[in-house]
Image (spheres, grey):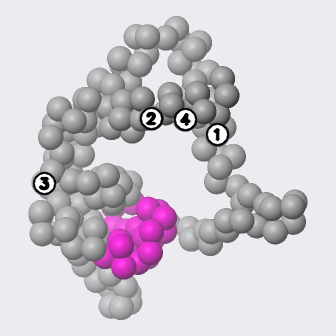
């Protein structure tokens, strides 16, 4: 398969991969960025705004806009750190948790559909390949073998 064929294949199938119909069926009232913010907030309970922006790979101004919308929708709540009042944290509300439970349920249905199309070995191989690609793309890429094209500062989220 050449790059043009791969490009055409991705165009024809991107919607099925990025936004499976199982998620479309629940008529999400949030954007993909908002969904990513909700998922990060769930993973880390009380996440700082800077860690949220880093986890979403967006500037702080974008993360702030996303959080503003989610607070208005009553899916996230803002708070201040007890140790340092300058630090803003966000956490899921009960409504946010309920929405993510719906998302998880529909994603399980999606993965069950994917698994039904493959043997167990093919499914495991596919997951391992996706992991390998994701890890490889996280590493800094270089031009001419010595200059980084993309470099991200890693911030540990606690």
In-image side of 109 versus 117 (left or right): left
Residue in front for this viewpoint, 16 or 154: 16
According to the picture, the residue beneath numbered tag 3 turns out to be: 95
Main secondary structure of the magenta stretch? helix
Mark 3 surroundings within 10 Å by alpha-carbon count, few (fewer than 14), some (14 through 19), many (20 or more): few
- Label 1 vs label 3, nearer the camera: 1
Q: Residue at image x 35%, y 17%?
A: 113
In the displayed orientation, state which residue is furthest to the front: 4
According to the picture, the residue beneath numbered tag 1 turns out to be: 133
According to the picture, the residue beneath numbered tag 4 turns out to be: 7
According to the picture, the residue beneath numbered tag 2 turns out to be: 11
- Label 4 vs label 3, nearer the camera: 4
Q: Residue at image x 33%, y 67%?
A: 46
Above or below for 124 versus 33: above
Q: Residue at image x 60%, y 44%?
A: 134
Residue 39, x across and y down, in percent: 34, 53
Instruction: Tell which circle, 2 or 1, labels the residue nearer the N-terminal end.
Output: 2
Above or below for 112 versus 94: above
Q: Are marks 4 and 1 in contact (CB under 8 Å)?
A: no
- Label 2 vs label 1, nearer the camera: 2
């Amino acid at each position: 398969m050449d790059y043009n064929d791969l490009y055409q294949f991705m165009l024809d199938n991107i919607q099925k991969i990025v936004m499976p119909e199982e998620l479309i069926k629940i008529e999400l009232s949030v954007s993909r960025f908002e969904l990513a913010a909700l998922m990060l907030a769930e993973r880390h309970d009380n996440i700082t705004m800077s860690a949220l922006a880093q986890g979403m790979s967006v500037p702080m101004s974008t993360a702030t806009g996303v959080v503003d919308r989610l607070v208005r929708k009553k899916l996230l709540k803002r708070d201040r750190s007890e140790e340092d009042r300058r630090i803003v944290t966000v956490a899921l509300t009960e409504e946010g948790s309920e929405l993510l439970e719906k998302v998880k349920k529909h994603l399980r249905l999606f993965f069950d559909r994917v698994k039904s199309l493959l043997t167990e070995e093919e499914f495991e191989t596919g997951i391992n390949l996706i992991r390998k690609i994701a890890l490889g793309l996280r590493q800094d890429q270089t031009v001419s073998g010595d200059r980084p094209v993309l470099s991200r500062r890693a911030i540990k989220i606690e």
